[in-house]
Image (cartoon, rainbow, N blue to C red):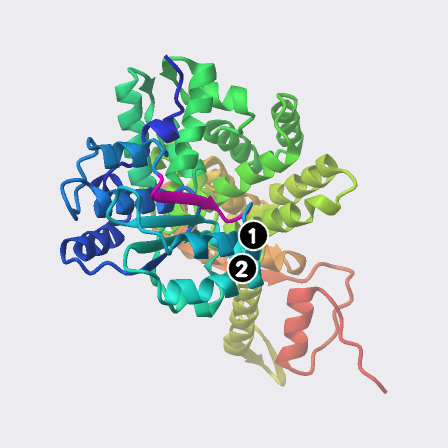
Amino acid sequence: MTYEVTAIKKRPRTFDELVGQEFIVSALKNSVVQKRVAHAYLFSGPRGVGKTSAARIMAKSLNCEQGLTANPCGACDSCTSINEGRSFDVIEIDGASHTSVNDVREIRDEVLFAPSSFRYKVYIIDEVHMLSNSAFNALLKTIEEPPPHVVFIFATTEVHKVPATIRSRCQQFNFRLISLTDIKNKIQEVSKDLAITIDNESLIWIAKEATGSLRDAYTLFDQIVSFSGNNIVMAKIQEKMGIVGTEEMGKLIQKLTQGDMREVLHATDDTLSKGISEEQFVIGLAEYFRNLLFLKSGITKESLLGCSPDTFPKETVDTFTIQQIEKALDLILHLYRNFRFSLNQKFELELLLSRLCSLQTLITPSELLETVRKLKADIGTAPQKKQGNRSTASQEPQPAKALSGEAILQGIIETIGKKKLTLASSLKKCTECRLHDNTLLLLFPDKDAFSAEFVMGERSTVSEIAAKLAGSQLAVKIELIKEAGTGQGPVSDDDENLIKKVFKGTVVKGE
């Protein structure tokens, strides 16, 4: 028996078998039942969503021996001849190869003759946008006032290239992309019919790669069956088709969060050595961060993610902020867009990964602005104590219990070191810790103002752990100190003071 590809074997033969086009199916059915058949239809939409199949079903509905019907029998001579493509009264024309005006003139002459055996003579012109302007002009009068026994059905993937004069004379139906869920269900149905076992991850991957085209999904399924046999698993697909698996990419991202550049580059080299291209690697990286962004925003719908949310470890999702993920995606997509101009794609990929290793230390413009505002507010509200004619900073806590304070700081760093790497790293920038009157004072050099500000944002966490270590409630206070030898002079206003503290510079005034 001759092998038949799945896309042909599973081609819709009735309106009810058309997937994901419910509105169009309903409209076409009603037009047939009510005998309000237009003389010209224009079916537009992406490839592989059922345009040509709908045209053939419409032809059967108009010519079935049971009469005009929304449900053609599929068994009469009329239906079978249309299914087999041997009907003289249903003429399918490829617009891409019949573009000239002479081709259209032949059609114009033929429509004058009545159907040989059917009720209607149906012309199905696929990719009609490929016709030349002169061909469209020759067709114009024919579709405006055709004989009563002729119906034109045009199909196109680029409706904007069809002249407005043609579109205005047709009933237009826009076919939609088929949802991931519908494609997944159809592939599962085919697998069951062929006694092929397929795991859920593979089903989702095929449906996602089809990008809304059921025909593409069937073609991809046939390709996978050719090397997987009767048992399809995602691991085999990744191996044979050079795909970076979600689990493998997840391990790489974990190394990124640890800032381990050496391990990241080793893991990347191992992946590329399996035959995966740099471009495919970047696509996998972008998809992973895109899913992290969705999960961070509370989106767990499988059809949106394109995979199960359980695939992504919670600690990886919690590691990054939304702003950091957006920045990572911006860097990745920028690299992908510039790949075709690259002298060495692997080198640029390694450079990208190097930048992503420091992603957790990223300060976005909005965060920088908020830091500046807080520092300015702190400068304006800092308590002052007058001594004689001088105004000095508030009395500093005495370092009587400095040793126990340092011990508490070390305990905090060890406690959170495995859970909050960024906070632990910031606390290590603290140069002195003092404990006085139930207040834990953390002193940071002014060059580490951003670390101090990050710790300030996590002050409740630090206070909670410090209280457990000290056995009593402790208030946490963070202050910046000027390092010796930097020569900071007096400031004239808050803005100059702010510049020196945040940007570690000096203000040079003109004479």
Q: Is residue 294 left or right of residue 406?
A: left
Task: Give the residue number, with chain letter if any, for mark 2.
Answer: 135
Q: Amino acid at mark 1?
A: Thr
Q: Amino acid at mark 2?
A: Ala
CB contact under 8 Å: marks 2 and 1? yes
Q: Position of residue 315 (x, y in %)?
A: 42, 37
Position of the C terminus, as image quadrant, is bottom right
Q: Position of residue 502 (x, y in %)?
A: 64, 66
Residue in view at x 63 percent, y 28 percent: 263
Which of these two is toward me, 454 or 412?
A: 454
For the residue labelled by badge 1, is the local secondary structure a helix, a strand or a loop?
loop
Task: Give the residue number, with chain letter if any, for mark 1.
Answer: 99
Q: Which residues are magenta?
A: 88-96
| Dot placed on the residue nearer the N-terminal end, 2 or 1 | 1
Residue 95 visible here = yes
Q: Position of residue 54 (x, y in %)?
A: 31, 45
Residue in view at x 45 percent, y 29 percent: 220
For the residue labelled by badge 2, is the local secondary structure a helix, a strand or a loop?
helix
